[in-house]
């Protein structure tokens, strides 16, 4: 089937769109030049049917691809699984992956994707929860634990990017040449980190003197890596759309916070890191 004949792939997201995980999928779709549409489902409707028929976990994203499978298309949930599907199904030219001619690199991308799913997302998310949403304010043991874990995750990425930089220096490449997690190009594994990275000023708010982050000083390669990805045309377009959604849509996560006994209030919006000059 030719790409020009493809129907839009539907990605379920929750307004106002600050939640990072759906945007991981949308970035990959945009980078591959695939048609897509966002289906907005309020947070208050995610834990019941009909949405749980698509995603039994009751979270976003879910994806429906009408171009494959039977009459109902292919339905998937969990951002990592969706990304793997999109890459396997549509990245025929190897834009965001490596092939069997670079077998180790092909599979090493999976290690990094799983690391993003099991490390960056959960640790950043827990840091946001205990910093901003937890009913007991200033719970330092939890804030410090997840803050230190978030920085440890970033340190793993930083160390890898530094090794990649050293390889380029040995090859006498220019200092401004981008470095990537695996091999010599930006892949889906790199891009999976972008949406959570944009929230770093929320993860580490400047108002919390006990757990600060100076990204450019503490993790300089990580900072350059993120900003290089955020400057890619497809990524820049997606992140600009996300900013517009945040600016114009009602934040339905208030519905969830109001009914959770362990939640206090949502964090103040912080401009996305690496977007629009930030």
Image: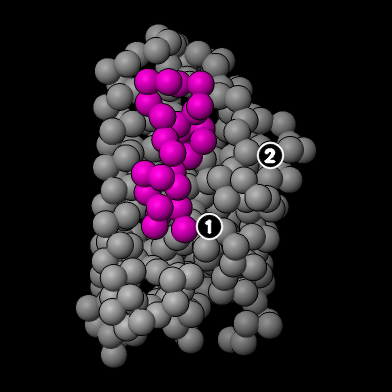
Local secondary structure at mark 1: helix
179 sits left or right of 201 in the view: left
Residue 110 at least partly seen: no
Residue at figure coordinates x 36%, y 82% from the top left: 172
Q: Which quadrant is the N terminus positioned in?
A: bottom right
Alpha-carbon span between mark 2 and mark 1: 20 Å
Q: Which x, y percent locates residue 254?
A: 61, 22
| Residue 259 in the image: above or below residue 108 | above
Q: How is the image coloured?
A: one colour
**Between tags 2 and 1, which lies in front?**
1
Q: Which x, y percent locates residue 157?
A: 31, 55
Q: Magenta region: which residues?
A: 200-224
Residue carrying label 2:
246
Q: Which x, y percent locates residue 260?
A: 47, 16
Mark 2 Cα within 10 Å, few/some/many (few <14, many 20+)? Answer: some
The image's mark for residue 19 is none
Residue at figure coordinates x 49%, y 28% from the top left: 205
Residue at figure coordinates x 45%, y 60% from the top left: 225
The image's mark for residue 227 is 1
Q: Earlier in the sequence, mark 2 or mark 1?
A: 1
Residue at figure coordinates x 59%, y 40% from the top left: 18
Q: Quadrant of residue 181?
A: bottom left
The residue nearer to you, when weighing 146 against 15, is 146
Q: Which x, y percent locates residue 209?
A: 43, 20
Q: Residue furthest bottom?
A: 101
Q: Quadrant of residue 232?
A: bottom right
């Amino acid at each position: 089937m030719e790409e020009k004949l493809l129907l839009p792939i539907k990605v379920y997201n929750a307004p106002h769109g600050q939640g990072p995980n759906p945007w991981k999928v949308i970035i990959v779709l945009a980078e591959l030049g695939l048609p897509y549409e966002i289906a907005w489902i309020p947070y208050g409707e995610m834990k019941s049917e009909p949405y749980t028929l698509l995603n039994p976990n009751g979270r976003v994203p879910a994806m429906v691809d009408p171009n494959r499978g039977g009459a109902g298309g292919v339905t998937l949930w969990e951002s990592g699984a969706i990304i793997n599907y999109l890459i396997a199904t549509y990245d025929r030219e190897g834009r965001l992956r490596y092939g069997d001619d670079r077998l180790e690199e092909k599979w090493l991308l999976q290690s990094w994707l799983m690391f993003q799913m099991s490390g960056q997302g959960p640790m950043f998310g827990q840091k946001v929860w205990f910093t901003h949403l937890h009913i007991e304010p200033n719970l330092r043991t939890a804030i410090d634990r997840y803050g230190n874990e978030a920085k440890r995750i970033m340190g793993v990425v930083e160390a890898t990017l530094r090794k990649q930089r050293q390889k380029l220096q040995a090859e006498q490449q220019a200092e401004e040449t981008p470095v990537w997690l695996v091999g010599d190009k930006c892949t889906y594994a790199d891009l999976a980190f972008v949406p959570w990275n944009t929230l770093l000023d929320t993860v580490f708010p400047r108002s919390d003197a006990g757990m600060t982050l100076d990204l450019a000083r503490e993790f300089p390669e990580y900072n350059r890596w993120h900003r290089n990805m955020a400057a890619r045309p497809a990524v820049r377009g997606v992140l600009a759309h996300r900013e517009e959604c945040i600016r114009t849509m009602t934040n339905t996560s208030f519905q969830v916070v109001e009914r959770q006994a362990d939640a206090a209030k949502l964090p103040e919006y912080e401009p996305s890191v690496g977007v629009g000059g930030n």
